[in-house]
Amino acid sequence: MRRVRIALLGCGTVGGGLVRLLERSRARLASELGVEFSLARVLVRDLARRRDGVDPSLLTTRADAAIPEDAEVVVELLGGIEPARSLVHEALERGLPAVTANKALLARHGPELFAAASARDVPLGFEGSVCGGVPIVRALRGGLAGNRVESVTGVLNGTCNYVLTRMERDALSFAAALGAAQAAGFAEADPSLDIDGWDAAQKLVVLSALAFGEWVPESDVRVRGIRDVTPERLAEARRRGRVLRLVAAAERRAGRLALEVGPRELALDHPLAAVAMEQNAVLVRGDEVGELLFQGRGAGAGPTATAVLADLCEGVGAPYFALTRSTSFAIARTDSKLSGSTSSSGIVIPNCSSQNVTVFKMDIESRRPLANSESSAPRPLRFLS
């Protein structure tokens, strides 16, 4: 049995979810993967706050003590830029595998962090930074390596999608729908990053770097949020046979990579039109594979913690994609017109004929390994100035 000590940086919503997931998965991880995770140190902002499943003696508020000598892997769930950047950099410089779910950090400092990981030949996992439990990062890093990606389009922000869905279905005002999202736990007390489009923009920067092998500065993304969307606008779109979604898109135009985020009307038969509530979806177009739709729960402690645990397993050499009841996803070809339906697991999955639907599908009960992609090296990443 291999025992692995974790330096956990941040124990809020996602960090707490990871602690609970590790405890629930302990026996299965030991029997199936031969690995047992334990906490070496937990960096927090408030020592007085109770954290279920965490020994209070492991807590610290000191960034300089956050990664002890006996730590074997570092998980960064702090959010923001500092001290997250410095601590992830420290972990990589020490040759420790690192995992982060911090899209803001990657959007701004991804090139330097990946360069540090490459220099030390240690993994830097970041599946949880984009779309929660939907394994889009793994697909772009390895599964589509034989394709030239032509475009990436997605509904990447669960808060905005929840708000727009409630406004559309229930004729709520923007303020009322946002309040409902906050009450349901799908929006922060200060939702500006989400509703102004910047959360989706940061995720798009990460996805486009993986898809196209180039980093676009966050400041170069054209961004518009949903503050000015009204129920009347949604109703008018519906009368024309269309729906409104906050869509993030990356594609090449005149030889240059263009990234945009903003409200976009979609025909009802568009693959992204059926994406509702807090769901996320990414539509990838490749020159060989055509269009692939990746869809599932993109927000919340469970899906993100699941993605973090998958990175943890991979980082320590356990080649399985750990899934729990907290997440599910589907990947479908979109060669024909699609309509959406809800599966028994609560995931909106396109209705397609058998020859169009399943490239890969794993539901909440499955724990099978992904296809071996060791021969498909991740695309090199460089910064676009």
Image (cartoon, helix red, strand yellow):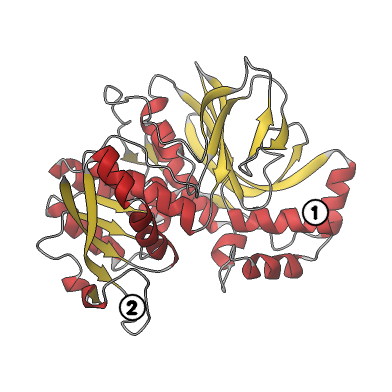
Q: How far apart, in angstroms, are the residues tagged by discs 1 and 2?
A: 39 Å
Is 128 in front, or is 38? 38
Which residue appears farthest toward the bottom when viewing the image?
Answer: 48
Q: Earlier in the sequence, mark 1 or mark 2?
A: 2
**Residue at screen point 35% across, 64% down:** 81
**Residue at screen point 25% across, 45% down:** 30
* Whole-percent x, y for residue 322 in the image: 37, 42
Specify whether residue 253 is in view. no
Is 127 in front, or is 229? 127
* Whole-percent x, y for residue 264 in the image: 70, 45
**Residue at screen point 37% across, 38% down:** 321
Report which residue position mark 2 lands on.
45
Quarter residue 197 falls in: bottom right
Q: Is residue 300 above or below residue 368?
A: below
Is 262 in front, or is 244? 244
**Residue at screen point 76% across, 31% down:** 269
Q: Is residue 101 left or right of residue 258?
A: left
Q: Is residue 299 above or below residue 40?
A: above
Which residue appears farthest toward the left when viewing the image?
Answer: 69
- Residue 168 badge: 1
At mark 1, the secondary structure is helix
Is 177 in front, or is 20? 20
Q: Is residue 190 above or below residue 102?
A: below
Q: Amino acid at mark 2?
A: Arg
Specify whether residue 72 is in view. yes
At mark 2, the secondary structure is loop
* Whole-percent x, y for residue 290 in the image: 56, 20
